[in-house]
Amino acid sequence: MVVTNTATVESNYDRKSELMAIDRSKAGIKGLVDAGLAKLPQVFVHDHLKLEMESGPTNANVEIPVIDLAGVNNDSTRRAEIIDQIRDACQKWGFFQVVNHGIPVTTLEETLNGIRRFHEQDPEAKEELYSRDDSKKVTFNTKIDMSQALTAYWRDTLTCVMAPHPPAPEELPSACREIMIDYTNNVMNLGLALFELLSEGLGLNSNHLKDIGCAEGLYIMGHYYPACPEPELTMGTGIHTDSGFLTVLLQDQMGGLQVLYDNQWIDVTPIRGALIINLGDLLQLMTNNKFISVYHRVLAKTVGPRISIASFFRTYIQPDNALRMYGPIKELLSEENPPLYKETNVVDYFKFKHVKGVEGTSALAHFKL
Ligand code: OGA
Ligand code: NI
């Protein structure tokens, strides 16, 4: 994709006050759209967009693998085949879709509906959750960054820290309270099953990844990407890798997610009832590059909204866990396969991740030996 309509970025606009006005409104991007906005505020115009777009052509003929999990727990031949497919996908793509994963389609649809209801309710009801305070378990905000020169994204997000210390039910918004709890239980179970399969795929004891805490911390982001009047000037979500262990992504039928594969952007085609699984930086570090964490992005579109729900299995910043070290798994190392990364703990990892921001190169490079 080549950008023909390249915006000239005015350098003299008051970025900070534009961002603060959006923040003060507490109504998110949806609030801007509902107010009838026809042109993008300057903070959303990506001056590096051209570069991003050109960092690889798109390829419409390739798809990420789709893996059918039917029979994984009661047919040992099938289980072995599934583990082979997962290993292959994790080595080549870092991304795959799963079907017959055990979470009912009605639960998936109702979760998407719940997040949509949250974002589409009266602005007054969302306002009280509008916050950038990381220490809160439930927040609503727009992806803008006051401190760094990063460009804003065209999306609003409800963030819920669901495990291991979930919020009290009444802290969750009433628009999606019950379904968030139900979906979390389902995703936690799927996560446990996936970490078993990944462990076996690595040739480890099936409990290995679970035993070192990979399935404990869950952080859920319910994204809402409103229709955008000038999508070629911005991004729904900019290029990034996920930082934790593993992400379970539920998307609606709108499309827009792309994964970088072989220097080309590949569309992740929506499949009703499927879930997208991708690996994060820490799992790449722990597998010493055997499994990969790859770049992805979400295009802004003139049609919308698009709803997606990203559930991140990650370490968590709690006193009982903060100093837990993560490094290349010893059982995977040998003389021919020496460690490529140093060990890190979650506190240092996130400190560095925050300095770098979320965009562009992954934080992994910092931990290379
Ligand atoms: C993310 C992400 C993709 C999407 O939240 O990290 O990549 O489809 N989301 O919203
Ligand atoms: Ni992501």
Image: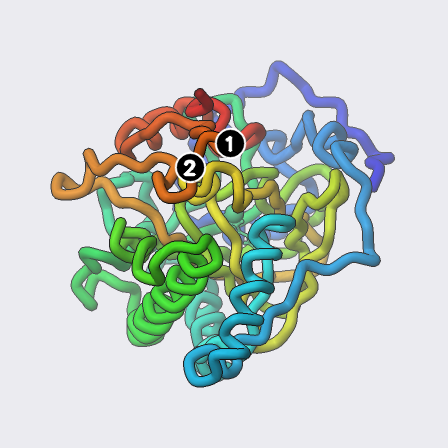
What is the number of the mark on residue 333? 2
SS type, badge 2 = loop
Query: Can residue 310 be spotted in the picture?
Result: no
Residue 233 placement (x, y as % from top left): 71, 37
Picture layout, residue 124 above or below residue 3: below
Residue most extreme to the top: 12
**In-front residue for pair 242/221:** 242
The residue lying at 46 percent from left, 23 percent from top is 368
The residue lying at 42 percent from left, 71 percent from top is 114
Residue 254 placement (x, y as % from top left): 66, 65
The answer for how far apart the CA atoms under marks 1 and 2 are is 8 Å
Residue 357 placement (x, y as % from top left): 46, 28
Q: Is residue 311 left or right of residue 347?
A: right
What is the number of the mark on residue 336? 1
> Which residue type carries mark 2?
Leu
Q: Is residue 93 left or right of residue 117?
A: right
Number of marks in picture: 2
Residue 51 placement (x, y as % from top left): 74, 28
The residue lying at 46 percent from left, 53 percent from top is 202
**In-front residue for pair 298/210:** 210
Say which quarter of the image contains residue 360. Answer: top right
**In-front residue for pair 204/100:** 204
Dot 2 alpha-carbon crowd within 10 angstroms: few under 14, some 14 to 19, many 20 or more: some
Dot 1 alpha-carbon crowd within 10 angstroms: few under 14, some 14 to 19, many 20 or more: few
The residue lying at 81 percent from left, 50 percent from top is 59
Q: Quadrant of the N terminus?
A: top right
Picture layout, residue 215 above or below residue 261: below
Q: Is residue 294 left or right of residue 103?
A: right
**In-front residue for pair 42/322:** 322
Q: Is residue 369 left or right of residue 82?
A: left
> Which residue type carries mark 1?
Glu
SS type, badge 1 = loop
